[in-house]
Image: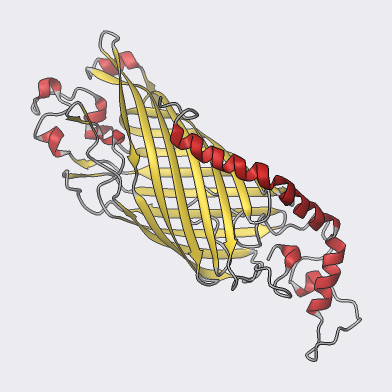
Amino acid sequence: MSSFFYNSKFVLQFIFWIIALVFLSNECMAELNNLINDKDQHENEQTNRLVLNERGNKQKESTNVSEELTLPENLSYPLFMGLCCGKCGGNMPLNIPGAGTPEPHEFRIKMNLSWGRMVGLRRGTSNRSTKDTLGQYMMTQRKMDMYMSNVSVGYAFSDRFFAGIMGMYMEKDMEMIRRGGRRSSMNSQGAGDTMLMTKTLLYADDYLIPTSQVSLLLGVSIPTGSIDQDDTGQILPYSMQLGSGTFDPFIGVLYEGSSSPFWWGANASYLARAYENYKSYNLGDEYRLDLYGMYQLRHNLVGELQIKGKYVGDLEGEAQEIEQDGDGHMNGNPNMAFMSNLYDPDNYGGSTVDLTTGVQWQPFRNHILNAQFSVPLFQNLHGTQMERDFTASVTYYIEVPLRKSRRSKKSGKGLDILGF
């Protein structure tokens, strides 16, 4: 059964998360409650540490901790540093590539499950009826569900440099309808392409608690996803394949700003499809622009709003099985019309703008649970394609400080009240 909640691959991952939350919730909530109840005591301890003289003797004079940390004074609202720390996870929507960069000498593990649904047809910016489409093609799609699961692991080597890898597993279910009303289905599932990426800090007004920072994202998508998916000996259309079949470099620039309890940012990226795969086609280049704003409601809860723009270029070339062998053509003849709009390369690419809302919750220290829901605001699709209905996702994010980290539990190291 291909349903999202009954597919064993997804159920096992949800069970893992639930077990972690159930067995650790008491300990974690106690830790947070103690942090809140003992806040004044911690502030006094940190004040004393900051005014140690060179001989190690404590001075008695009053010191303003906010001034020492270059933070704003006379705040009329609770001062928050984000969910994990002042510059890493919890301060960006976790669906943005490069989001959640940990402190130096820390690992980051991010697990994501998503479910996207597409219903109905669109040509350009206008809806197109199934009846009209079947006047042009023998068959077309009615709806599609896509389930994705990915796991990424990264490590921060310094304040300026982070590297990571992300693997993906996906399943695509599509329902088709033919002239005369007969229905059929297509299915593909397996590993998707693997992403290698690095993030380099170009500018920050403060390494400890920045209010403005700019980073450069560089990486490459490795073609581990299959482009040989078929059904009864006939290759499936391009949108049902699991990868691109090419090594695809990408570059991005990320800006993050903050003024507690607000967080905001802009992220622009470009993914290049530089050459044809071994099937003699290549997918379109991708351009993305993300704008987001976040508001920290309390020490362990952040709300987020995101506008995601995306442009995908035209698909170039044709798969050998389609162009030469006649797969996807009437009567299997490559000189005849396409059976479905899915096999026609003119029906790929376009522009979309999505609105995403979400919430990030910190169940315990260095862990974040991020739930998001997206709906399209604008779709301008090349040719006849399915229009997207919604996407729902859940992300679990963990930061693991090593001994060399500023946030390690070694005595006398780090600013505990800030989560470091």
Q: Is residue 42 left or right of residue 353?
A: right
Q: Position of residue 341 (x, y in %)?
A: 25, 26
Q: Residue at x 80, y 52 (%)?
A: 33
Is residue 42 shown left or right of residue 104?
right
Q: Position of residue 248 (x, y in %)?
A: 30, 54
Q: Is residue 151 above or below residue 322?
A: below
How many numbered circles are shown?
0
* Residue furthest bottom as drawn: 55
Q: Is residue 230 visible?
A: yes
> x and y percent of residue 236 in the render?
24, 31
The image quarter in which residue 409 lies: bottom right
Which residue lies at the image location 35% right of the left edge and 25% below the top edge? 174
* Left or right of residue 170: residue 260: right
Q: Quadrant of residue 100?
A: bottom right
**Front-most of 320 and 400?**
400
Q: How is the image coloured?
A: secondary structure
**Above or below for 365 versus 420:** above
Expressed as whole percent of the image width and height from the top left, the position of residue 28 reads 72, 51
- Identify which residue, 196 or 308, lies in the foreground: 196
- Where is 286 relative to 322, above or below? below
Q: Is residue 187 above or below residue 253?
A: above
- Residue 306's image quarter? top right
